[in-house]
Image (cartoon, rainbow, N blue to C red):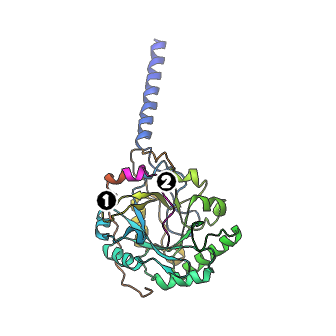
Amino acid sequence: MATSLTMTRRSIAFTAVTLMGLMLAACGSVPTEVAAPQTGDHPFPTITHTVGHHAHPVHGIDVSKYQGQIDWEQVRAAGVSFAFIKATEGGDRLDSRFRENWEASRRAGVPRGAYHFTYWCRPMADQIAWFKRNVPVEPDALPPVLDVEWNFQSPTCPRRVPVALAQAKMREFLHAMERHYGKKPIIYADIKFHREVLAGNEFAEYPFWVRSVAAVPHERYPGRRWAFWQITATGRVAGINTPVDRNVFAGTRQQWQQIAQTGFRHRGHGATAVAAAPAPSAQPVALAAAETAPAQVPTATTSVPTAAVPAADAPAMTTAPLPASRPRF
């Protein structure tokens, strides 16, 4: 009798453990932590660890002239929730399709922001003036993005500057953008630049957009809290006839909708705090194993698509080969 009772208890315990394991497996792709930024200085939820990009329901793209003419209505219908659009480079280069993409995405109701690619040999004051001249101030636009990478292939600016100088140049641009646009700027960094210049939680008060196409970000950016993650350079999206960079947002769809309603402003400019919401369940998905006019424009009410990016695009997101560096002028 005692033996039978012991076996019964063991059976119950084993069943409970098995059920718990199944439940954990069912939600294995839920991010392990999603929260509002610790500094409270910007509205974007940030995350350190995640098991994969399919854990994140809010998807976006980043584009430049190399995507050609884009049908932004189709892009939005495909479930794209945001876009980063290349605007400027250095102190005198403007992406030839920036204004076209900026206006067409606004008309289609796709929340978008403009990004600037840094030239390390050009005074930052020139680059600030050039960006402000070409990117209008719009209340419902995403914050401006500072793209920081080494660009050794550049025919005119292949140099690497000292870490202290690179950080000083970044602060100059970021402070100027926040004053002008009223929003905490976003920093885009690749793995090499982050490791050499930004490791040690430098610039933690800013939302980060990280690039990691073959591993989850915490394996490439240890300790870095990120708001956006570039997951591939060879994604496919309806309305775009070329491969395109695909991205995910760290927070939930509810959080995205909440911050969109504030115009993506940070707390210092009237935004309200964003409460963390439960992340949706999804089946675990492994990442790829192989590394691969200055004039003001009318604003439009931002409407966030409710559908996720179609599943048919998933293979391009998970089997991407090593992409070349972003095309530059």
Q: Return the residue found at the far top.
A: 1
Report the mark closest to the observer, 1 or 2: 2
Neighbourhood count class around disc 1 (C-alpha, 10 Å): few under 14, some 14–19, many 20 upward: some
By secondary structure, the bulk of the magenta-drawn segment is best described as loop
Query: How far across and how far down the image is residue 308, in percent?
Result: 34, 57
Asked if 85 appears above or below 253 in the picture, the reply is: below
Q: Could you tell me which secondary element the residue under label 1 belongs to?
A: loop
Query: Could you tell me which residue is drawn at 40 percent across and 80 percent down?
Result: 99
User: CB atoms at circles 1 and 2 under 8 Å apart?
Assistant: no
Cα distance between the residues tagged 1 and 2: 29 Å
Q: Quadrant of residue 111?
A: bottom left
Magenta stretch: includes residue 81: no
Neighbourhood count class around disc 2 (C-alpha, 10 Å): few under 14, some 14–19, many 20 upward: some
Magenta stretch: includes residue 319: yes
In this figure, which residue is indicated by the disc labeled 2? 322
Q: Give, as a three-letter code, the residue at label 2.
A: Leu
Q: Quadrant of residue 125?
A: bottom right
Query: How far across and how far down the image is residue 301, in percent?
Result: 34, 76
Relative depth, front residue between 101 and 144: 101
Asked if 273 appears above or below 213 in the picture, the reply is: below
The residues colored magenta run 315-329
Mark 2 or mark 1, which is nearer the start of the sequence? 1
Query: Could you tell me which residue is drawn at 39 percent across and 56 percent down?
Result: 57
Query: How far across and how far down the image is residue 291, in percent?
Result: 51, 50
Taking 192 as reference, is 17 left or right?
left
Query: How far across and how far down the image is residue 253, in percent?
Result: 39, 60
The answer to whether one can see residue 201 in this image is no
Q: Give, as a three-letter code, the residue at label 1.
A: Ala
In this figure, which residue is indicated by the disc labeled 1? 307
Taking 316 as reference, is 90 left or right?
right
